[in-house]
Amino acid sequence: MPKYLYIETVGCQMNMLDSELVVADLRRQGYELVDSHKKADTILFNTCSVRQHAEDKVYSALGRLKHVKRDHPDKIIGVMGCMAQKDQKLIFQRAPFVDLIVGPGQLHQIPALIEKVSRGAGRQMEVSLGRKDAPLAQIKRSHESFDPLRTVEMRPTPYQAYVRIMIGCDKFCTYCIVPSVRGPEQSRPPEHVEMECRKLADEGCKEIVLLGQTVNSYRYRDDHGTTRLSDLLLRLHDVAGIERIKFVTNYPKDMTDDLLQAVRDLPKVSPYLHVPAQSGSNRMLERMKRGYTVEEYREMMARINETLVDATISSDFIVGFSGETEEDFQQTIELVEECRFKNSFIFKYSERPSTKGAELYPDDVPEEVKKRRNNELLDVQNAISDEDHIALIGRTFEVLVEGPSKTSLKQNQDGPLLQLTGRTHCDRIVVFDGNRRLIGEMLSIAIHDASGQTLFGSVVTEHVGPEVFELQT
Ligand code: SAH
Ligand code: SF4
Ligand code: F3S
């Protein structure tokens, strides 16, 4: 008898990858994935704590399950990921019907823990040590990297895969919860990463996205010396079958020349850099403890643009951080206008308990002001994205076809011809009509229309005219 699993995931790419790996692990135990909690024997929430809103979403989803558990006491309900690590037992208090709490460092234990609960051992909790609770080596061990070998049928798409190259974060930006829930920064051995990429390539994967909270801080030291991200990219570039390599997210201070040169010199590496600035005001950057000034960020942008022609850069911003004045905010607008990011993710500051920010600085920008600044900055960014996309009309891009577009999915288009979506090397989204069998192909797409988020185009069919014929004879 198969068992059925339902999983809901919020948060960053790390969480997407973790959910994928947990699902793969449970499939090996005979689970089948279903699309509703109603059909499931086990219901898992993979959670995020980066903003209060992400936590509220999970607690209200849990609230809605209260009666489900009452009517079906055998269903197992689990909370995994960053909020499990942050809130721990509090989750049992707020939702007493939860059976399982598992931190991001203990995901490999999930199958065994579910088994324990179903045998009647009662509710289970496994989390990592806090960052001040033990000597560093012990804390590191308690945050294990969860990267079991995967097989192709377990990934959402066979042509693309996330590959984790490091876990944790040591930057401790004052607003941020990540270092305390994901633990100390630890880089995976390059040979493990390479082995995983080779296996993925053997199974038909064409694009890998290397993941790390500060991916360009990657450093692995052993008897042969230090491997930096640039060295790792060089090594992975040799993996036959892999056609594109991307990496996210970058920390501005670690955007070194060797890395930019590697992006320039290795054709498989996408000329796309996500390097969050967070603010354009030095006063804010200092309060945030980001470790750079806005002048240093500008200097980094200049180096990127000098080394990489045609690279796209994207950023994250927090508006309404403690003490942010109109003048600080104007400086952020100026930075966005000057840098012309491909896109920016903009967030209203959300105070996180136990961070330095919460301890030292009051959350003193009113919600309406945060909202207004958020919208204003978004308008500035959208205008830039629109302009830059319109300027690309008429150009042709190599696009890796990812699958049906959102519109096709919504309309349940199930014939061979449908609207497809893919991305350019520099990470722009392209939508076009084509045959389903093109999914996973690298195609030339001519762009004939654009919005700020999306380019619209059509497949360039090879022109077999008389001149080609003449060449062949
Ligand atoms: N490791 C990545 C991203 C971390 S979280 C990095 O350092 O860039 C993703 C984004 O969420 C951050 O870049 C930041 O813009 C935002 N963020 C983090 N903590 C936040 C908070 N307390 N309130 C609002 N936004 C936050
Ligand atoms: Fe959070 Fe800063 Fe680490 Fe990014 S670098 S995860 S924002 S502490
Ligand atoms: Fe959220 Fe954890 Fe990622 S807090 S942003 S899911 S590392």
Image (tube, rainbow, N blue to C red):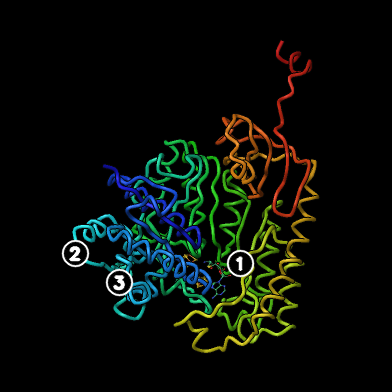
Q: In which quarter of the image is ligand 1?
A: bottom right
276 with respect to 133 (left or right): right
- Quick one: which residue is furthest to the front in this view? 71
Location of residue 45 in the rendering, given as x and y in whole percent from the top left corner: 41, 61
Residue carrying label 1:
276
Element under disc 3 = helix
Instruction: Identify the mark nearer the N-term, 3 or 1.
Output: 3
From the image, state whether disc 1 or disc 2 is nearer to you. Answer: 2
Q: In this picture, is 133 found above or below 20?
A: below
86 with respect to 453 (left or right): left
Which one is in front, 58 or 222? 58
Q: The residue under label 2 is which amino acid type?
A: Ala
Q: The residue under label 1 is which amino acid type?
A: Pro
Location of residue 450 in the rendering, given as x and y in whole percent from the top left corner: 76, 48
Residue carrying label 3:
137
From the image, state whether disc 2 or disc 3 is nearer to you. Answer: 2
Residue carrying label 2:
121
Find out if the beta carbon at label 1 lies less than 8 Å from the nearest ligand 1 atom: yes
Total numbered circles: 3
From the image, state whether disc 3 or disc 1 is nearer to you. Answer: 1
Element under disc 1 = loop
C-alpha separation, residue under disc 2 versus residue under disc 3: 31 Å
Name the residue located 60 percent from the left edge and 56 percent from the top edge.
Answer: 260
- Quadrant containing the C terminus is top right
Location of residue 103 in the rendering, given as x and y in whole percent from the top left corner: 35, 66
